Amino acid sequence: MSGGPPAAPSGSGIAGLVEIMRRLRDPDRGCPWDVAQSFATIAPYTIEEAYEVADAIDRMDMDALKDELGDLQLQIVYHARMAEERGAFTIDDVMASICAKMIRRHPHVFGDGGEAPDWEALKAEERGARTDKSALAGVANALPALKRAEKLQKRASRVGFDWPDASGPRAKIAEELAEIEAAETAEERAAELGDLLFSVVNYARHLDVDPESALREAAVRFEKRFRKVEEVADKPLTSMNIDELETLWQRAKKTL
């Protein structure tokens, strides 16, 4: 008998990926790095891959999207394999759970063909089955800070805890700015700045603006304009005073 390594899995679908992950996690013949990983160490990669999917979509790069979706699928299989090793659940359980959820949430498609259900009421019913009965239950801590703030605010709004219009959060921004200026310690300033950012998210929500997308686009604009400033500058930026820099910045804004 040959003592060489077993042949690589031949399947190219999800079953093949599941088998690849099983082999990678094999404690005797697997990859030492993969064997050493845990849910906690893999979670940052899962978040990163989701962002890379979003980036490929932003760029409408279909080849990149294909690859990034594969990387994201690997993360799902990875977590499912670690759960199976613990006897918690399998990848089939994951698939069965999401299939059941989608069918349950779309009775107008998979049921009697009636009207679409009240989406928020349906999700509230699902949350009601959980131990944590708070209106804020299930808002993940690992979400980007802006997105999590927005979700918390939307959840609170569903039970009436909200300003009636945009003037409320707009006034709150001015209030928080004043509290930052009045803060006496670094800890107080940090707390008040957090409150200010939370209020800005609330203001954006009342204006029907997605704060995460708005900030991302602002960062893109800043990068383009700053690169333009670097391009047109006739001497190092470090040698310029604030007025010279502002002049270049305004020139860049007119072109980008």
Image (tube, grey):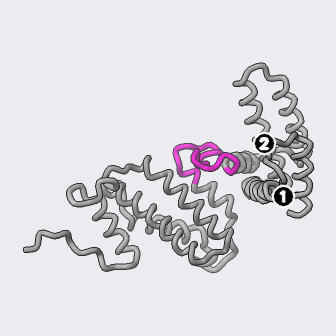
Alpha-carbon neighbours of circle 2 within 10 Å: few (<14), some, or many (≥20)? few
**Horizontal arrangement in the rendering, residue 246 relative to residue 104 (left or right):** right
Query: Which residue is outermost to the left?
Result: 1
Residue 142: percent from the left, percent from the top? 57, 47
- 139 in magenta: yes
Residue 86 falls left or right of residue 140 = left
Report whether residue 92 is seen: yes
Q: Which disc is residue 232 wearing?
A: 1
Vertical arrangement, residue 231 with respect to residue 189, above or below: below
Q: Which mark is residue 21?
A: none
Residue 233 placed where, x, y %?
A: 83, 54
Question: Element type at marker 1?
Answer: helix
The residue lying at 48 percent from left, 66 percent from top is 71
Mark 2 belongs to which amino acid? Thr
Judged from the image, the secondary structure of the residue bearing numbered disc 2 is helix
Q: Amino acid at mark 1?
A: Val
